Amino acid sequence: MSKKSIRFFNDREVRAVWDEEHSKWWFSATDIVRAINDEDDYKRCRNYWKYLKGKFAKDGIQLVSVTNHFKFQAPDGKQRFADALDAECVQTVAQHYPNNRANAFLSWFTYSDNSIDGQSKKKAYTLVESGLLDSLKPGTVECLQQIHAYLFGGLYDFAGKIRTKTIWKDGTLFCRAEYLMKNLSIIEQMPESTFDEIVNKYVEMNVAHPFMEGNGRSTRIWLDLIFKKQLKLCVDWSKIDKKEYLAAMRLSTTDARAIKSLLQGAMTDRIDDREIFMKGIDYSYYYEQTE
């Protein structure tokens, strides 16, 4: 099965398919239009893309890397062949867009892969092939450290290292550094045989926030490993809305019912499905994307 990826621009999905033969991503042309125009109507975007192709041809602008050899999921849920653009062609489209709405999109597109998040996300995609996940002990602090070290190694000098400073985020104070190691030891020993126990452990690890940065992305993978080991289930993160997730996690410090409800509604037994894993990475990084 082809590798698939989802990027997010202003909460709009920009889907991509990996071309193994040419070692590059192909992006849905209709998604590019939807993102730039901030348009809900899929049919209108598809028609606008047809108009753009005609306009570019008339103006002598060559879109040399357009192909319809890749399938994307249509609004009715079926997989259909659709126009796809490689990165160079995406930039050509954005640079010659009929209005200036594409400027912000172009800045995001050219920056996203080279940012720390972009580089870390590429590393996250390779977790399955690396064999690392099969060697870890789910639910342990060491497991979480190894995930963090893999995702952020070479990007942060503190990759995989427990923080020694107290941190805040959006007004939330996480576990004070002087108590962190003791709390992590307690969290590691928490039971994890039921759904509720596993989520409780996840919530406590989030409150601990053991790293200076990259906690959410690492801990969501850690959570899925526990679910897989104990319940033979994992989370289909694409079913969980970003705003609902963030709100539920903020509330979880005093009441975990909301996050439990969201996770319960997104559980799947497709634990070995590569697409579920890839979408999980896409959405996990999307949750951390600032507005």
Image: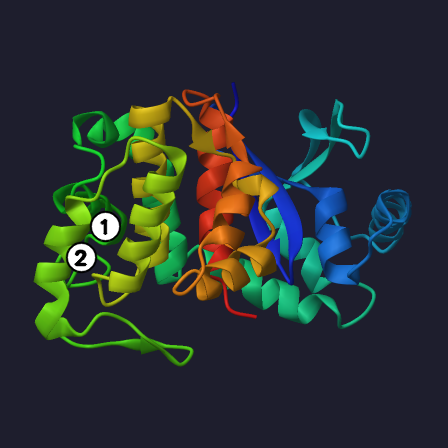
Looking at the rendering, in which quadrant would you find the C terminus? bottom right
Above or below — where is 230 with respect to 139?
above
Residue 3 seen from this side? no
Q: Secondary structure at mark 2?
A: loop
**Label 2 neighbourhood size at 10 Å, few (<14), some (14-19), many (20+)?**
many
- Name the residue type under label 1: His
**Mark seen at residue 287:** none
* Left or right side of 12 for 240: left
Viewer-proximal residue among 12 and 161: 161
Q: Are marks 2 and 1 in contact (CB under 8 Å)?
A: yes
Q: Nearer the viewer, residue 11 or 185?
A: 185
Which residue carries the number 1 mark?
148
Image coords of residue 21 (percent x, y): 47, 23
Tell me the kind of residue under disc 2.
Ala
Measuring 43% from the left and 60% from the top, which residue is drawn there?
252
Q: Is residue 167 visible?
A: yes
Mark sitting on residue 159: 2
